[in-house]
Amino acid sequence: MLKLVNNLDTILTHYPDQNAESLAKTFIKEMQKNNQGKLYEKHLSAYLEEVCFGLAIQELYEELKLLKYTRSDCFQEARKVALEPMKIYKTYNFKDSSPKTWGKIQIKSKVKQTILLSRDFGRYGTWSALKYLSEKKLREALQAKSGIKAKKEIESYVLVVNSYKEIYPSSQSKKIKGRLPEPNQAQWEEIQKYYNFLCSEYNKKPSTEGCARLEAIINFQVIKEKYLACYSAAKNYIYMVEDTVENIDIVADEFIPVNHQEEEIETEKQQQIASICLDEFAKLPLESQKLMQLHYGLGISQTEMQEIFNFKQPKISRKIKQSEQKLLKALVKWSQENLGITVNEGIIKEKNQPFKDWLKDNFQQQFEGVLEENLWEQQKSKIPMLRLYYGEQLKLETVAERLNVSSQRITQEIEIVKQNLEIFLREWVKEKMDISLSNSRNKRIVSFVEEWLNNAPYEMWNVSSQRLKVRS
């Protein structure tokens, strides 16, 4: 920690006017060049700690609290991802988003991916779960948790599950609370026959590693045993135990496997997906772009947008959905061409909410950047006060005492800051988007500013706690 502090002091001595974002970009560039990479990774990991805290306090907690995750649990999971910033920023291009927003999206996505996979796996039950598990995850589970090392055996178990997926239909009439019952003997025998067919097809392929041929299975009970072994390995691999915060560090490595190479691949895919969405968004009509920005970025309702665009609400809803579909179609086409994924209606429906989460994060950060620019450039002296009141959530009287001014003065100054931010944001929307926000829509501006002040990265702004300056 002392080494980090000394290094940061040295940097600030040479570049005293750099803010948190510019410093983070500097660290990312140096890390990507592998120039003293470890030290810059530690700086970035510290930089992301407030992002993790913000996610844990609000977004991750709100989405995961029904799964009995506390804010502390969410913070711990976010920090595990943030400890490896090279995996987060390896493909960062310095154009599409700020380092903070990029990190926030990556961390949130990875945490949700791990936790929700665990939830869904447990929900499906023994005879349904493996139908929804990808072959990639199954192979990882077998390698990590089954004790099987030979490639031949791994392939045999994978073919058992593939045969099960193909032969045993998901549309069974005798589902128990939505879960499939165990196949009967006749169904197991059909699965066995299909497995033997897949084995014969596999054995026709030229071996690149000299592994032995797969043998046919003559007893359906062996198929069943192999299926159950796959289920057990998968469950042990991805299942997240509920534990106390005190014990979470002890059990974390056992229940959250890390595959660095595949994390890098996943990050590159996410960057490609983000670029595709942004490129496709730029092709939309300007009017549609504005609808998406206001809807997802500022949270302005479709009813409120009727006055802005002089459209009825159904038409606004239709335009937003059409824009979403265009972006999704571009993603589907890319997935088919680059990932070999056969995209069906079920997959599109499953990915619809994460896609909307990405839209919200992406457009919100645009408006958040406007507020950050104004606060840093025009109201920098107020940051220590805001840090105490919003960042540390101290009482008004405590803030006044810390800054040696009256409580009334603090109230007045906070109100001035909010008004300035609201005015600046409205003027920016007017100038950049040619949209006037008034009446009820101004309430959304007020709400957006208040939300941002509650979550702004105060600790990342290097402003000393000096005496509060009075406006002249």
Image (cartoon, rainbow, N blue to C red):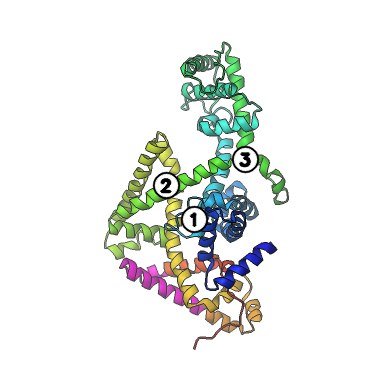
Residue at 52% of width from left, 48% of height from top? 109
- Measured along the vertical axis of the image, is residue 330 above or below residue 147? below
Q: Please, what is the three-letter code of the amino acid marked with disc 2?
A: Ile
- Which residue bears the numbered disc 3? 257
Category of crowding for the residue at label 2, using alpha-carbon neighbours closer than 10 angstroms: few (below 14), some (14–19), many (at least 20): some
Residue at 48% of width from left, 69% of height from top? 372
Q: Which residues are magenta?
A: 415-443
Residue at 41% of width from left, 75% of height from top? 423
Comparing 333 with 436, the one in front is 333
Q: Please, what is the three-letter code of the amino acid marked with disc 1?
A: Trp
The reply to whether the magenta stretch includes residue 384 is no
- Which residue bears the numbered disc 2? 273
Main SS of residues in magenta: helix
Q: Please, what is the three-letter code of the amino acid marked with disc 3?
A: Pro
- Measured along the vertical axis of the image, is residue 302 above or below residue 342? below
- Which residue bears the numbered disc 1? 102
Locate the N terminus by quadrant.
bottom right
Nearer-N-terminus badge (2/1)? 1
Nearer-N-terminus badge (3/1)? 1
Query: Can I make out residue 46 in this image?
Result: yes
Category of crowding for the residue at label 1, using alpha-carbon neighbours closer than 10 angstroms: few (below 14), some (14–19), many (at least 20): many
Whole-angstrom CA distance, mark 3 to mark 2, is 24 Å
